[in-house]
Amino acid sequence: MKKIWVKAIPWNKEIAMAALECGADALWIPPGMGQEVRKMGMIPTVSEDGDLLLGRDVVVKEIQEKKDEEEIVALSLSKKVIVRGGEWRIIPLENLLSKTNNLFVEINDLKEGQTALGILERGVDGVVIDNPDPDVVRHMVHALKRRDEKIELRPAKIKRIEPIGMGDRVCVDTCSSMELGEGMLVGNSSQALFLVHSESVENPFVNTRPFRVNAGPVHAYIRLANGETRYLSEIKSGDQVLVVSFKGISYPAIVGRAKVEKRPLVLVEAEENGQTISTIVQNAETIRLTAPSGEAVSLVDLKEGSEILIFREDAGRHFGVKIDETITEK
């Protein structure tokens, strides 16, 4: 798991409280403030007199030239190294990540954090959030921790599949190539999302497009990388959707485009724990849902009793944000 630290230097009680409330892994504070933090709650501290000692357990090193990389590699063998870069940031980190571990970077916003945690498909071991806004800090910690979130998928059994006519269907084309067993969570209700498989399966009709999920009509919900949901009609270039594997492993994918076209549609109803849930998809052989085994099952091969994977959520959503309120969607 990646580590998310929060920096409260100069001392800022609201930032420290935000770090505690949202489950940050450590708090970087000025010397002498450890007692204040302990009054607020339990969280490891980074300081000259903290739980992790600056200079002994944690060091800060700036990259200005090539020899700095060699020094950081040596330091990282026994310490956590917070790397600060000048004008060049990505390339030095790539060089370091190819040689060593124990690397952290300071970040100011969410995109910096997502980039740092994804470099070379491996990312640094942790980030240090340095932002003066407590609400932004909370949002960043929650969003970055969700990168390692394992989605709890459940099996549901198909009840019926029924053609329902024409509608506006959305294909979500991403900047990532998905593999077999991967797709996106889409459904008629934000509380019941189906794992719609990517177009990564060979077939005799069209070429594979592993960057794409033929998701469903414009009204349907899709799960985003930040944990919220959004209508498919609202998805646009630059958004980050959540890609999920049949094992529940997830990662963010950047949307390159959302393509809306009129297509014939079918209603897919399934049953899970005695409740009927549904989604609508395009009526085509290349549309696939995902079986518990990871198999991509074509719409034409689904029958009553077939098992497919879904994601359930008890809470409702307001403007895509999870809330504790009774909301029924039919």
Image (spheres, rainbow, N blue to C red):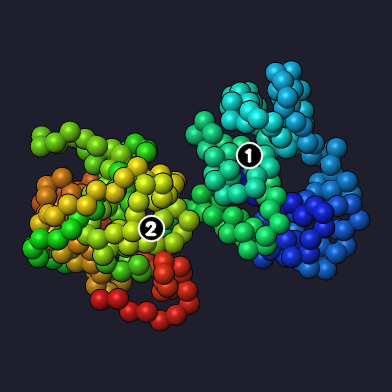
> Considering only vertical position in the picture, is 172 above or below 125?
below
Badge 2: residue crowd in 10 Å (few <14, some 14–19, many ≥20): many
Residue 58: x %, y % from top left: 79, 39
Q: Quadrant of residue 230?
A: bottom left
The amino acid sitting under disc 1 is Asp
**Residue at label 2?**
223
User: How many angstroms separate mark 2 from mark 1 (CA)?
Assistant: 26 Å
What residue occupies the far bottom of the structure in this picture? 326
**Residue 54 is at least partly visible in this image:** yes
Query: Which element is circle 2 on?
Result: strand
Task: Looking at this view, name the residue that lies furthest to the front.
Answer: 87
- The image quadrant that residue 307 belongs to is bottom left
Q: Is residue 282 left or right of residue 231?
A: left
The picture places residue 233, in percent across and down from the top left corner, at 29, 59
Tell me the residue at 35%/42% (across/down).
Answer: 256
Identified at 79% across, 61% down, the residue is 12
CB of mark 2 within 8 Å of CB of mark 1?
Answer: no
Mark closest to the chain's N terminus, 2 or 1: 1
